[in-house]
Image: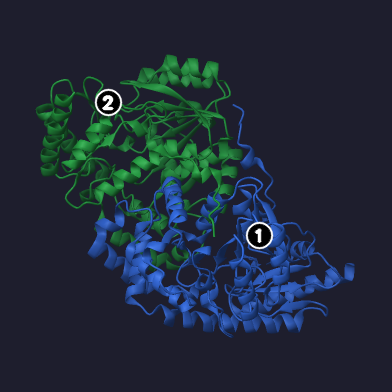
Chain colours: A green, B blue
Amino acid sequence: MQLNLSDRILKPDFQGEFTASILAAAASPDLISFAGGLPNPVSFPIPEMEAATKKVLEENGVTSLQYNATQGWPALRKWIAKRYETMGVYGVEADDIIVTNGSQQALAMFGHAFINAGDEIIVEDPTYLVALQSFHVFDPCVLTVTMNPDGIDCEELARTIAEHPKAKFAYLIPNFQNPTGLSYSQEVHDKVVEIIKNSNVMILEDNPYRELRFAGTATNSFGAELGEQCCMLGTFSKIVTPGMRIGWICVRNKELRAKLLGYKATADLHTSIFSQMVIAQYLADNDVDEHIAKTKVLYKAKSDLMVSCLRKYLPAGCELTPTEGGMFLWVTLPNNLSSVDLYRKALEKGVAICPGDPFYEYQRNVSSFRINYSNSTDEAIEKGIKILAEACEELINEQ
Amino acid sequence: MQLNLSDRILKPDFQGEFTASILAAAASPDLISFAGGLPNPVSFPIPEMEAATKKVLEENGVTSLQYNATQGWPALRKWIAKRYETMGVYGVEADDIIVTNGSQQALAMFGHAFINAGDEIIVEDPTYLVALQSFHVFDPCVLTVTMNPDGIDCEELARTIAEHPKAKFAYLIPNFQNPTGLSYSQEVHDKVVEIIKNSNVMILEDNPYRELRFAGTATNSFGAELGEQCCMLGTFSKIVTPGMRIGWICVRNKELRAKLLGYKATADLHTSIFSQMVIAQYLADNDVDEHIAKTKVLYKAKSDLMVSCLRKYLPAGCELTPTEGGMFLWVTLPNNLSSVDLYRKALEKGVAICPGDPFYEYQRNVSSFRINYSNSTDEAIEKGIKILAEACEELINEQ
């Protein structure tokens, strides 16, 4: 028979092709990979998870193995709602939370709920590549706003919204942005609030790395000032475990929440109740802040080591965006050299990075690239950055 | 702000409104519910799951908590591939399987991959209501083919395909169909194979209840004869646990599989690797066939009891579709009485059923309804069917 697929699944997927090629390369066992965004396995609370699963199965086994409600496990939603107080958002209720298969699923649900083909949406430039992929499914017109060292460019954002008042939403990552590792300053935060308040644009705030701050002070979540005009994504992937795929979206607008729930029911009924209950039990029986504090000490050391190796080995002219947390550094090559060329060259030498191109909606032959420091041993960082520096050197000399 | 949602999420959702109202009603603790499709919790292997989780965390903790590949855990896919031999399908490889969040997610992925707005698809009439919902997301033209006591109406299927040769796929549930509880006979199976082989229509075979046969002989999976022209959905929900949301789709066409994998990566990266590894460990360390055999003894007794109560208490003129397995019975009221009216009346008396209407794409005021026998105690079955019979009686007398 002849396959006769939908137009939507046959569309080119620039981001997808990149990630597929990076993943394929990463399968090589000898590769030093700085390309992904994996937590360090040292940070996984394995014995605590064992205790939590035992308790869930012994005390509540039937519930943990049976079908459950689409919205998610109440005790877990209650914990998440309360957690928003640490981000300056008060009055969030358990009913405002929908538990999803990682915050990734919430991105797809949000695109589904908002985007008609041709609708305008706003993203930071660059932005998280899989968010771009999720939105592309629905054929939006993507408006990009420059990401500055202190956050999104407010003048450009204001102009974009003035020129495109019907833009459906703005997808923002205010802390340790993926890919740049940059955070919004308080000033930028306040300006964004002002611009958005006077518009009809919804904010979709993604904040997977906020808890991983090892220096400086975080701004509040935009939900603090914007209320229903801000939906907030969250995840346990970076602070407890990504393997269980437990994320959430906080939606305080009732109508939108009902629509998202209806769609999630159709998409997969509900997220693994077993995983949800195990995480809820883990949170009830352990001090997650202590766990996060330990993880931050580890990541700060990794970040410091990688920064010092980059400064030591990279050829002159390479620039480095400093970060105060998260998992990534963002490096820019001199002379408009292509990060895709560097990616290929470094890969031949056994080191993977993530070139900048797939993080941009329109720009190509980008000179910047993302490197992850959370998931490598100190030895791999030292060795990998040396090799990367050699590749940079060669690229510059070939010019 | 004013919410400005997508057209697609604002569409009326007949099936969704029904299930929401049934779920809301089911929240009442005194209700006897025959409306859902839940396994009996007595069948959950709780101590075995505890042993499996302990082993996974102790022997492979880091892997079970880290990100993993989109396609799913290799050991689990290998088990699933081998299992197809029991359905007459040989040569299925682990690489043909994509693990999904229940087979529900695979339905959504399939709709995404095949349906452009207006594309024709074929379903049994009646069919699984959430499958209809999943497909509706993509605005298909739904062609319905009557479900007879021995399976889909072959003459009607042949005519439908002859008149609509561009139909993208036919969604079939050959064993203990949801909602009717009916199965395809060998004769119908063979005719369907012949019709499909000579067409360009893909079969999407859904088979969640096949393992729960307590009488008669099952036909092979359509994949045995149709090869790449048949994609096969499966799930652990009815034989081990639905709470972990582990299902799959077997796709032997490489191009389609790559497209589905690309979409799944965007939708939620991957299905909980923790849950996948726990189920794989459970399957490695236990005799699942023995477990299924016990479940079947339980379900046969429940089915026998419910059938005998229905025969004893229901007023004359009510008809009952016998089943040889699965979870459901399908009852038809006399005199074209409406099952929605019965649903409302029974609900007032504290018993929930699932009226026929949402299982049909076009028919309304349907006289048939679905009742589930797997998830009630014997006392609830006896008491609930008595009440249901009273409601029937009243409905007939009001006519």
**Considering the image in quadrants, where does the C terminus of chain A appear?**
top left
Vertical side of B38 occupied by A131: above or below:
above
Vertical side of B39 occupied by B112: above or below:
above
Which chain contains the residue that carries disc 1? Answer: B
Vertical side of A271 occupied by A394: above or below:
above
- Residue B165: name its quadrant: bottom right
Q: Residues within 10 Å of mark 1 (few under 14, many from 20)?
A: many
Q: Which residue is mark 2?
A: A367
Pointer 1 with pointer 2, Cβ within 8 A = no
Which chain contains the residue that carries disc 2? Answer: A
Residue type marked 2: Ser
Q: Nearer the viewer, residue A348 or A189?
A: A348
Residue at point 80% right, 61% down? B365
Q: Which residue is mark 1?
A: B122
In the shown orientation, is residue B21 left or right of residue A108? right
Residue type marked 1: Ile
Please tell me the numbered disc located at residue A373: none
Q: Nearer the viewer, residue B45 or B29?
A: B45
Visible residue check, residue A103: yes
Residue at point 60% right, 71% down? B193
Q: Residues within 10 Å of mark 2 (few under 14, many from 20)?
A: many
Q: Nearer the viewer, residue A242 or B229?
A: B229
Kind of element beneath mark 2: loop
Rendered location of residue A151, percent (x, y): 35, 22
Residue at point 42% right, 43% down? A103
Rendered location of residue A231, percent (x, y): 49, 35
